[in-house]
Amino acid sequence: MNVLITRPDERGQQLVELLAKEQIFAIHQPLFSVVAGRELPLLPSTVSGLKAGDFLFAVSKNAVDFAHQTLTEIGFGWRSDLQYIAVGQATASYLASHAMQAVCYPLKFANSEGLLELPEMQQNLQGKTILILRAESGREYFAEQAKQRGAEVKVLECYQRIPFTQDMSDKISLAKRAGIDTIVATSSDIVSMLVAQTREEDREWLFQCRLVVVSPRIAKDAQQLGWQTKAIDISEKADNHSLLNTLLKS
């Protein structure tokens, strides 16, 4: 097994290192860079405008990093009278360590559906505001459902994902020649970019690669793009150790 890791930033490199300890060859090739979001200057006033008991939802470690840096630079602390939520255990722990507050997260399904099953989301959300810290775009399902339950939802762009386009087709073709037969993709955006940046003559190889994803939704999107169901494995969680365990099951 030779693995292409598309997970961005240091988490992708960490997964490469975990695989190396298992004597598995892996290449780290993120498809986009992460930069500060355009709405970060609005974060302090937006957080200040929340009422006690409102919710703050961080979708990723990147959102936490950029938000924490912005708040710290002006001496603005994370409020202790808000309810903090995250979609997965890793992001929840990361947010808790920065905000120094308790953070709720779904135990069973690390996705929007699991988030909506939290007891905090079952109460009457009328009069509550949910502030979502995320990238320039993202899945809208949680926000839509929360609005239907009576919440006011505010979305703040904490970071942007800038696709790498220069020489990306060459890099993907190089991965093919290096014998890559397994690909790890942790979002639907990554799967879509992977297909878009792969040359037509390399598409057959791409769709024959085993694809490891982190949710049934991403798996469904991958099927629509061209992967066969049997070629897709779904990791139980999105953290690197869960991904490693899924990869080792082959």
Image (cartoon, rainbow, N blue to C red):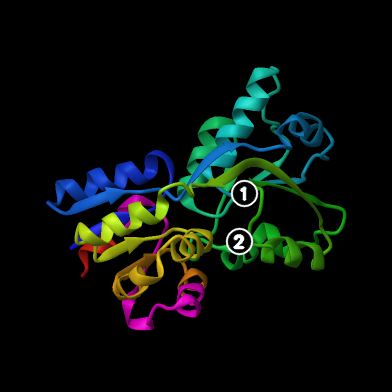
Up-down relation of residue 72 to residue 103 (above or below): above
> Where in the figure is residue 93, as x and y percent of width and height?
48, 42
Question: In the structure shown, which secondary structural element does the residue marked by tag 1 occupy?
Answer: strand
User: Where does the magenta region start and end?
Assistant: 220-243
What is the quadrant of the N terminus in the image?
bottom left
The residue to which callout 1 is attached is 85
Q: Secondary structure at mark 2?
A: helix
Q: Name the foreground residue: 33 vs 9.
A: 33
Q: Which residue is mark 2?
A: 115
Q: Is residue 249 left or right of residue 36?
A: left
Between 240 and 176, the one lying in front of the other is: 176
- Whether residue 111 is visible here, answered yes or no, is yes
Whether 228 is among the magenta residues is yes
Residue 83, percent from left and from top: 69, 44
- Residue under the image location 81 percent in, 58 percent down: 151
Q: Amino acid at mark 1?
A: Ile
Disc 2 to disc 1: CB gap under 8 Å? yes
In the rendered image, residue 185, in percent from the top left (x then y), is placed at 41, 60
Q: Disc 2 residue type?
A: Leu
Which residue is rendered at x = 54% and y = 37% of the image?
96
Residue 50 to residue 238: above or below: above
Q: Quadrant of residue 140?
A: bottom right
Q: CA distance from mark 2 to mark 1?
A: 8 Å
- Residue beneath the point at 60% across and 68% down: 113
